[in-house]
Amino acid sequence: MVRTLHGGSTGLCLLVLPLLAACGGSGGGDDATVRVLATDGAERFAVDVEIADDEAERLAGLRGRDGLDAGEGLLIVLPAQGEVCITNRGVAFAIDAVFASEDGTVTALAAGIAADDDSLHCADGVRYVLEVAAGVAEGVRPGNRVIIP
């Protein structure tokens, strides 16, 4: 389940940043293709992702881009599994965020996060956050699997 915190959440975000460095996401790391599978093994979608696996990349996120194509995304890799909060502040387009555990199990989905939304979208038990264009993750449910090469 995703918890969304609205307005006045900037202070909380600053507290979360040093711990998980995940408010936002990043572009500029390595590339890979990530697949999301339903519980029956059927492919929900596949995207070519940039991997944000260091603090600078996670903080930069999708900021400064005009958008994402349906086949593109950003995979945020956190240093450890735990609670993570993301924001779409400073991003010019809406996104879906798929939260996944260490073994790739989808734990939560935040669908249709608006452009420049400064709310925090938080989930627990997360090691990976897959950010894709809004609508791409339609139909993804907790229990689905994110396959990361």
Image: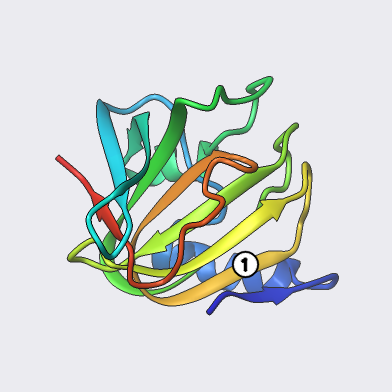
**Colour scheme:** rainbow
Left or right: where 33 falls relative to 131:
left
Categorize mark 1 by other alpha carbons within 10 Å: few (<14), some (14-19), many (20+): many
Horizontal and vertical percent position of residue 149: 14, 39
Is residue 53 in view from this perspective? no
Q: Residue at position x 61%, y 66% from top?
A: 14
Report x, y in % for residue 42. Answer: 28, 50
Give left or right: position of 16 versus 12.
Answer: left
Residue 46 appears in view: yes
Helix, strand or loop status at disc 1: strand
Q: Residue furthest right?
A: 7
Residue 19 lies, with reference to residue 71, above or below; the image says below
The residue labelled by disc 1 is 121
Q: Residue at x 41, y 71 (%)?
A: 142
Asked where in the image residue 62 lies, by quadrant, the reply is: top right
Q: In this view of the protein, which residue sits in the foreground, 37 or 126? A: 37
Q: Name the residue: 53% across, 53% down.
A: 97
- Type of the residue with mark 1: His
Q: At which x and y percent is residue 44?
A: 39, 46
* Picture coordinates of residue 111, whole percent (x, y): 63, 56
